[in-house]
Structures are given as C-alpha cells and as structure tokens.
Image: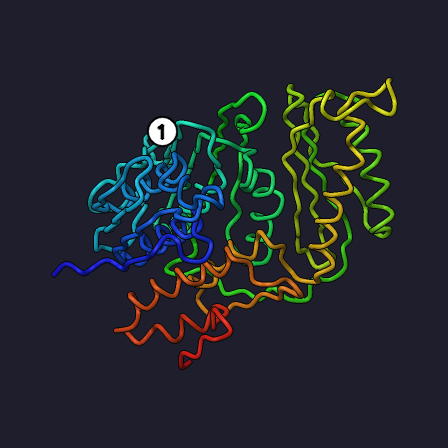
Amino acid sequence: MEVDPVHLDGTTLEGGGQLLRVALALSSIFRTPIRVSRIRGKRGPKSAPGKDGGLKPAHLAAAQWLARATAAATVGMELQSTELTFRPASQSLSLGENSDEPVQVWQQIFDAGVLARQETHIRMSSPGSIALILQAILPCLLLSSSSVPLWVTIAGGTNVSNSPSIDYVTEVFFPVLQSKLGINRIETSLNRRGWSTGRVEMGSVTFKFSPSQHGSGLPAFQLVNRGMVSSVRVTLLGHGASLRQAVKSKLTQMLKDRLPAAEVHFVVEEDTGDSKKFYLLLVAQTEQGFRLGSDCLHVWKNSKKAGRTANKSMSPEVDQVHALLAKIMENFMTQIDRGGCVDEWMQDQLVIFQVLSNGPSSIDTGQLETSLHAQTARWVAQQLLEAQFDEHGEYQRRRAQISWPLFPDDERDE
C-alpha cells in the first residue's frame, strides 16, 4: 500500500532552500515520501515574496542526485518547479558496492582488479553553492554502507553570495565534525575556485570519504566548555599584493587589539586575478578545539562612486579596507562574545546531526538566539520524525535528542 507523502509548506519559517535540503536528506535516509509545495516561497523582494522561488540549479542538482541514489520516484523535478514530490524506494539506504541493484550515481574504480573506490559527479549549470549541495547529501554519505572510499566531485561555486564558502567548510564545518562529533575525516581537494562575483566562473571540489564506520546512526555529542580563543586563522583572497598587504597589516593590528592573547595565522592567501573578487574568513580557534567563523564576500566599489582616495599612492580598494574590516571585526567579535561553542551558521547545520545521532546530543550556544534557519531545520525534522517513528514508539526518544520545543508556545506533551 502506497503511503501518502508528508506535506511540507515551503513558505514555513525561513521559507527558502534550507527547508528543502533538510527535507530531502531526511526523506532519503528514513525512506519517507515527501511533497514540498511553494518551494522557496519567501524568496524574492519584500514587495513580491515568492517571485524568485522554485528550484534553482543547485537545488535541482542535489535533488536529482538523491533521487538517483535512492531510486526515488519524483514529480516536479525541473528548474523553477514550485512543487516537488519525492518518493524514495522502500529499501534501506545503500550507497555501497554490495547493493542488489547497482546505484547509477556511482562509478566503480578498480586497481589491479580490486575495487579501490567509488566516484560520483554532480554538476550545475551555473556556479551555485557547492557547500549547499554538500549540505543536502552529506548525511546520506556519512551513513552509507560502502566498504571502500567514496569520492564526490561537485562542480559549481566555491565562493558564492549568501552561501557558505568552501573555505568555511574546510576551516570550520569539517574540523568541528571530526574533532567534536567523531565523524570520520573528510579530505577535500579544491580543484578550481568558482565565483558568483566579478567574472562569473565555475569551480570544482572533490570530497573524499573513508569507508563508513557510523552504521545506522551518527555519534552522539555534547558541545560544551568552549574555552578562551587561543588563535585566529585567516583566509584572504584578493587581487593585488598591495591590497592583500593592507588587509593583513590592518587586520593583524585589529585582532591584537581585541584578542591580545590570540595568535594570528594567515593560513590561506591567494590572488584572485580580479579586483571584483575578494573574500575574507576569520576563524576563532579555542583552547578546547572549537572553531567559530565569520566571513565576507565583497565587491569593491568603483573609485568614481567611492570618491577620491585619501592617499593617491593607494588604490581605491586599499582606501576602503578600514571600513570593511571594521564591519567584519564587529561581526566576528559578536560570534565570540556570545560565549557559545558554535557560530550562527553552524547552529542550523548541526540540527540534522542531532536527529541522526545514536543518543542525546547537546550544544551550548551561549547567548546565541535560535536562528530562523535552525528553527526551520527543527520543524522539518519534527514532521519527518513523526511520520517515521510514531507507530514504532521511537518518536519521543528521537525528539528528545534535539532542542524541543521549537517555539515558546509549543505545549505538546513530552
């Protein structure tokens, strides 16, 4: 008997791609069919919400890959679609080489006649965020049954407006997963950067997963006792040696003034080859090994619009450094001063790990308020958990593993 899909209104809470990504991931793992209506229904100008809604290339690429990996039947799988029905095959999630039927997303690579690894490729038609595609498929990869390494190459954008960068993934997200959540190390190879600013460029990243050791659930975790900031790791991407030197000098001074006991390390410095491509990431590393990040993807103003520079020997870009760094530092220190173990971007990404953990998991967020993205992830999890576990007596246990209730007026019985 075919089960009715769980209906999710895409305009709920955050009303964007976060809802869709979490829903697709949990649907794929639980094998629970879903129907998402009014997809990204809050995207667009305030005067016309929903105008920019529907499936964009990045959302479509993630959904198509998960559909192939889970042999899902779908309706509405096309660009700009505002409604998607996703019905995975009923068997348990299996991304490994021992599946009864070969999974078409994987190519088997042999060495001397022995299966060495499996590879898959995800391509977008434009430089959408590679990090957001990874966010949708990562839980499935971590719970795969493969006994050989999995290599996932995603073509798209590494540095994209309003999206996590690949630098944030490798400097904050992955290190926290490995050191604090007990997730196996994920090796990252940056093949080429892809940008949404300046001259639009496609990039490519390969993620290499070791054979799974997580079984049917992820490790439980407690993120507490953050400790003091011991160092700051900086990623600096900009065009021109004079610009980068001006940023390094001023930023080092500002960090020493605000965090005098912290060492400052410029771990990545690259010339972007384009004055309209500039990216800066600051990562606070604490004495207990936690990492909190704050970044900025910036386009320098045209010199005619920005006015004359105070120093004619400097470029207009260098003249704007101080104002830009003041803004970045304010946000960075806000993340630190809240006293939590995670920054505001990590908060929502960890919800699904709480849902899938093998026991209660807690996060000390300090004075960080629950973001709209985190509320959205929790709401989606609630809908899928109810559908999956109500009849099996597991819902209450699973629900206790994440921060319920969702809202102050949620009086549902615990």
Query: Where is residue 209 shown, x and y percent of the image?
Result: 46, 43
Question: Residue 207 versus residue 59: which sits nearer the camera?
Answer: 59
**Hey, what amino acid is under mark 1?**
Ala
Quarter location, residue 34:
bottom left
What color scheme is it?
rainbow
* 6 in relation to 169, above or below: below
Query: In the rendered image, which quarter contains the N terminus?
Result: bottom left
Q: Is residue 312 left or right of residue 115?
A: right
Query: Where is residue 391 shown, x and y percent of the image?
Result: 25, 73
Q: Residue at x 43, y 43 (%)?
A: 48
Report helix, strand or loop for mark 1. Answer: loop
Q: Residue at x 46, y 30 (%)?
A: 156
Query: Where is residue 211 shown, x and y percent of the image?
Result: 42, 47
Q: Residue at x 25, y 49 (%)?
A: 85
* 362 in relation to 135, above or below: below
Residue lying farthest to the left in this orientation? 1
* 360 in relation to 35, above or below: below
Q: Residues within 10 Å of mark 1 (few under 14, many from 20)?
A: few
Query: In the rendered image, which quarter contains the C terminus?
Result: bottom left
Q: Residue at x 57, y 38 (%)?
A: 165
Question: Residue 249 versus residue 354: which sits nearer the camera?
Answer: 249
Q: Is residue 57 left or right of residue 283?
A: left
The residue at which mark 1 appears reads as 112
Question: Residue 74 versus residue 198: which sits nearer the camera?
Answer: 198
The number of discs equals 1
Residue lying farthest to the front in this orientation? 47
Q: Is residue 317 left or right of residue 299?
A: right
Query: Where is residue 224 shown, x and y percent of the image?
Result: 64, 66
Question: Residue 208 versus residue 45: which sits nearer the camera?
Answer: 45
